[in-house]
Image (cartoon, rainbow, N blue to C red):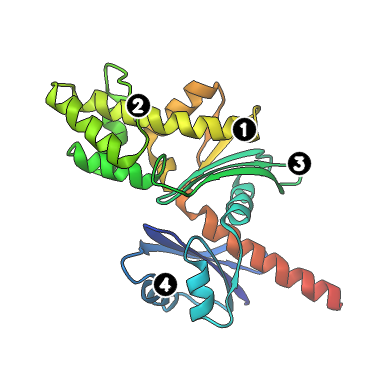
């Protein structure tokens, strides 16, 4: 049976998904990107059977250089295709990963219609949340739960990581509760994400993909701020790799059909 792999090389993690010719999931795995993403990607690929591969994510260019037979696709298209496989009627996607954040609107055929992307700094990304969690003494898994348990909304004025760290230090020195600070930081991320979403789409449910979709506070605050339902796939961090695998499988199928 022919199998197609999609690999999403992100700043923090690498995801690998394998599907068959009908687009059915065969295998998936994940690993930390580390300091040498190509070596880590090679290790992951050695553990799964596949015939062809398509890469996405910030490291897709490196991967294409290292593997002559690899094809690539943008993160925007990959996440859109992955999300549509779970939510066929999706019209709006929010993807927040380790290095960037994206808001995507889709037409009624699941094609990308419009998008906004923040990839110039860590503000509003998983890296921002990771750094702030560490500064407050939380693990990344504890951070969202702590923010949900906060009693007060604190305002964090700066989205620059350096200045936000300084602001957090000042709040701690003034005796502010760690949970309230955590909520303020989450609210600052949501404010930026909500602005991006509103610029591409104003109606209907939002499908939340990327690793930050596992943060329950971000999900709840986005829903509250925009008054829209937020849906999260079972494995939101796999959407890019899944989309790449499905796009590859469909591309090969179309070529075979054209040849008759």
Q: Residue at x 56, y 83 (%)?
A: 68
**Secondary-structure class at tag 1:** helix
Q: Is residue 235 visible?
A: no
Q: Quadrant of the N terminus?
A: bottom right
Disc 4 and disc 1: Cα gap in Å? 35 Å
* Above/below status of 48 relative to 204: below
Residue hosting label 3: 108
Q: CA distance from mark 3 to mark 4?
A: 34 Å
Which of disc 4 and disc 3 is earlier in sequence? 4
Which label lies toward us, 1 or 3?
A: 1
Compute the Cα span from label 1 to label 2.
22 Å
* Extreme residue in the top direction: 152
Measured in 3D between alpha carbons, the distance from the residue under mark 1 to the one under mark 3, in whole angstroms, is 18 Å
Regarding mark 3 in the picture, which secondary structure is present there? Answer: loop
Residue at 48%, 80% (x, y): give it: 66
Q: Which mark is residue 41?
A: 4
């Amino acid at each position: 049976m022919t199998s197609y792999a999609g690999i999403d090389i992100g700043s923090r993690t690498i995801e690998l998904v394998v599907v068959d010719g009908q687009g059915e999931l065969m295998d998936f795995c994940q690993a930390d990107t580390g300091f040498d993403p190509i070596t880590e990607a090679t290790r992951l690929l050695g553990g799964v059977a596949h015939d062809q591969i398509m890469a996405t994510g910030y490291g897709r260019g490196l991967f294409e250089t290292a593997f002559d037979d690899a094809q690539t696709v943008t993160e925007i298209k990959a996440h859109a295709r992955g999300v549509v496989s779970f939510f066929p009627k999706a019209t709006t996607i929010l993807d927040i990963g380790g290095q960037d954040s994206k808001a995507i609107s889709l037409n009624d055929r699941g094609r990308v219609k419009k998008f906004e992307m923040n990839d110039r700094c860590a503000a509003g990304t998983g890296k921002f949340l990771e750094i702030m969690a560490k500064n407050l003494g939380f693990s990344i898994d504890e951070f969202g739960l702590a923010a949900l348990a906060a009693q007060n909304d604190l305002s964090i004025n700066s989205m620059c990581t350096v200045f936000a760290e300084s602001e957090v230090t000042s709040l701690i020195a003034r005796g502010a509760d760690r949970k309230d600070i955590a909520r303020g930081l989450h609210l600052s991320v949501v404010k930026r994400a909500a602005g991006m979403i509103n610029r591409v789409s104003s109606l209907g449910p939002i499908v939340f993909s990327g690793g930050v979709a596992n943060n329950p506070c971000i999900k709840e605050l986005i829903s509250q701020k925009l008054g829209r339902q937020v849906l999260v796939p079972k494995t939101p961090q796999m959407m890019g790799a899944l989309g790449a695998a499905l796009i590859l499988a469909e591309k090969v199928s179309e070529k075979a059909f054209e040849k008759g």
